[in-house]
Amino acid sequence: NDLDVETLEVLEEILSTFECTVLLVSHDREFLDNVVTSSIAFEGNGRVNEYVGGYEVWLRQGGHWSDEIDSSVSQPAVEVAPTVSEVASKSIAAGNEKKLSYKLQRELEKLPAQIDKLEKALEVLQAEIAEPSFYEQAPEKVAEKLQLISDQNQALEELFERWSELEEMKG
């Protein structure tokens, strides 16, 4: 809180290159967009959803703050947010306002499947590293898996960016 611009930039740079998990809470939306790879949103009525990316990605994926409290909810429920591939499929199915070229339309149609495949691969890897015995392996193997996760997260982010770019192009 209340960091000067230079200190904030240094902190962003350090966090961007940091290889471990950090739980970060901030009101600075731009800062979050610059450093986070995943957001956990407490959206009211006991709903907790995870989104890939920062604040702006959360908004594009349908995230919102609930102003109304549903009195019919007796116990908090944890919901799983729809994956970006599901949102993309619905968006494609809804029709195009502007026409993309044939090549770009095909690329857009293939992105949800690519994203889904990569998300599933990441789930498998994350389950592996969640095992208590994972860190008992040789440090090289641990580092290799962690690098693979990092690379796949980067690839997933690039797919999201491309998907967003193509969606914007079609209107």
Image: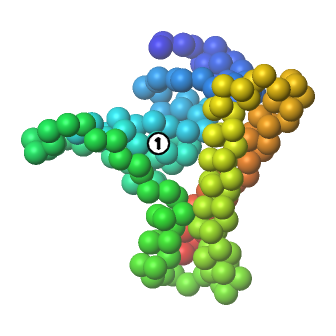
Q: Position of residue 111 (x, y in %)?
A: 64, 68
The residue carrying pointer 1 sits among few (fewer than 14), some (14 to 19) or many (20 or more) residues within 10 Å by Cα, namely some
Residue shown at 47% from the left, 14% from the top: 1
Check the image and name the residue furthest to the front.
Answer: 133
Q: Position of residue 32 (x, y in %)?
A: 54, 32
Residue shown at 87% from the left, 25% from the top: 138
User: Dividing the picture into quarters, in which one does residue 10 lie?
Assistant: top right
Between 149 and 30, the one nearer to me in the picture: 149
Query: Is any part of residue 30 visible from this angle?
Result: no
Amino acid at dot 1 = Glu
Query: Is any part of residue 83 visible from this angle?
Result: yes
Between 91 and 9, the one nearer to me in the picture: 91
On screen, residue 103 versus residue 28, left or right, reads: right
Q: Is residue 14 above or below residue 115?
A: above
Q: Position of residue 64 (x, y in %)?
A: 33, 46
Between 75 and 90, the one nearer to me in the picture: 75
Q: Is residue 68 above or below residue 163?
A: above
Residue shown at 62% from the left, 54% from the top: 119
Q: Which residue is under mark 1?
A: 50
Residue shown at 42% from the left, 78% from the top: 94
Q: Position of residue 85 (x, y in %)?
A: 54, 63
Local SS, label 1: strand
User: Dividing the picture into quarters, in which one does residue 68 lie?
Assistant: top left
On screen, residue 27 versus residue 143, left or right, reads: left
